[in-house]
Image: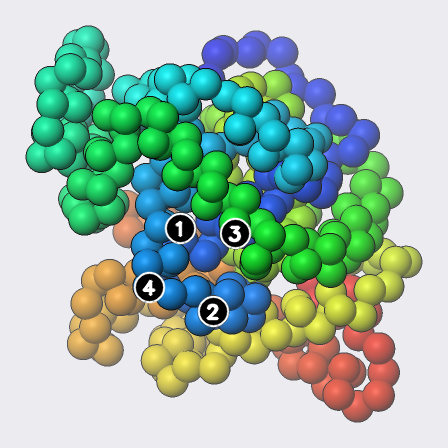
Amino acid sequence: MAPFALNLERPRNKPSLVMVEPALNAFGSMLLISKGDDNPGIHEWVTRTKSQMTDEELFRHKLVMIGFHYSILPQSGGTTFEDYLADLEATPPSVLRERLLDAYSKTCLTENCAQEQEESINWDEVLSSAKNYVDFLRSRFGEELTDEEMETRAHQYVIDPAALKQLVTGHIRWFWKNHLQAEWTRVRPLLEESARAFNQIDYGDMTRQEIVNFVTGKEYNEMKWGDQLETARDLVLIPNAHIGPYIRFFKVQDSVYIYFGARLPEGSNIHVPELDRAEIVSRLSALADDTRLHILQMIAENGEMRSQEIMEATNLSQPSVSRYLTQLTATGYLQERRESGAKVYILNKDRIEKTLKAVNAFLLGRTVLPKELT
């Protein structure tokens, strides 16, 4: 990710911080389809759409959305998906490749690439073979985040920009027409209601960190992108119909965008039953698993637990425990803090009580109020 320019002035909060952002919003939903795992709370549209696609279509989707992510990322906010497509199709093939390679040159997620970043990259050498290309990505993103099969295929298109453009524009237009356009028509009114409700709030005295916590309904005290959040020119929060309890952060030029699951603020006088129902489904999905319930029960009995203690108690691997804890933290059932460099997890009793009250109200004939879900 590109570094941010230093801005000593405190960023000003715009009157409308929560925006639907059609192109970016739909792009975010497309990205969910490319992920390999289905976390609890993710909207059923994601799973249903995957089931309707062939293995070849799913691989191509992953190749386009992840392998060429930086080439196709919408370059500005406030555009429709149709305008985004038209802009993509008007972009020269060489520019699409330049966007990708420029982003890779500025990305360093491993210790080994820190020194390499100070040196100029010999792109002729990197692109001379699929092996060199994959090795370069490993040096930047690490082994776990580098899909050798996908990036080997991606190399064929990176060295042929015209083919790259034909692939990405053709696939995105196909996916929009066959899987996303009708769904976007369905969810857009819900997203507009969510944005309208949040934009009635006065954020004038709140820091950007406080705004993000309020809008997403989560307490993020040690976010890895905290510095970038404060120094970016603009902050825009995007309610997404499919992301569930998770959030996603990214930057386009000088603006920071944060996806969050479409919801209503506490105390809002706007009422959208489908958003209330989606929030309940998102909460209950995290509980519909024996291992996650077991982890919650252990932490409740012990008061607090470190991830290492949970690994030992469950005989699960570190990646598995990390995934479960991320899911339970995202849905708010667990709170996380650091102690002596280790993550400590505590049960959020208030979130559990409010979830049960919301389910009780929803099923026993009284409309769920937004404050019962927050």
Q: Which residue is mark 3?
A: 175
Which is nearer the eye, 237 or 206? 237
Which is nearer the eye, 81 or 228? 81
Q: Circles 4 and 1: CB distance less than 8 Å?
A: no
Q: Amino acid at mark 2?
A: Gln
Specify whether 251 is left or right of 165. right
Compared to 365, does 97 lie above or below?
Answer: above
Which mark, by number, is residue 61?
1
Q: Circles 1 and 3: CB distance less than 8 Å?
A: yes
- On the image, the x and y values in percent for residue 370 come to 78, 64
The alpha-carbon separation of the residues under discs 3 and 2 comes to 12 Å
User: In the current view of this chain or complex, which residue is farthest to the bottom?
Assistant: 364
Which mark, by number, is residue 7?
none
Q: Amino acid at mark 4?
A: Asp
Marks 3 and 4, the one that precedes in the sequence? 4
Which mark, by number, is residue 55?
4
Q: Amino acid at mark 1?
A: His
Q: Quadrant of the C terminus?
A: bottom right
Do we see residue 139 in this rendering?
A: no
Residue sitting at 73 percent across and 60 percent down? 186
Q: Secondary structure at mark 2?
A: helix
Q: Which residue is mark 2?
A: 52
Which is nearer the eye, 89 or 154? 89
Q: Quadrant of residue 255?
A: top right
- On the image, the x and y values in percent for residue 211 come to 67, 39
Marks 1 and 3, the one that precedes in the sequence? 1
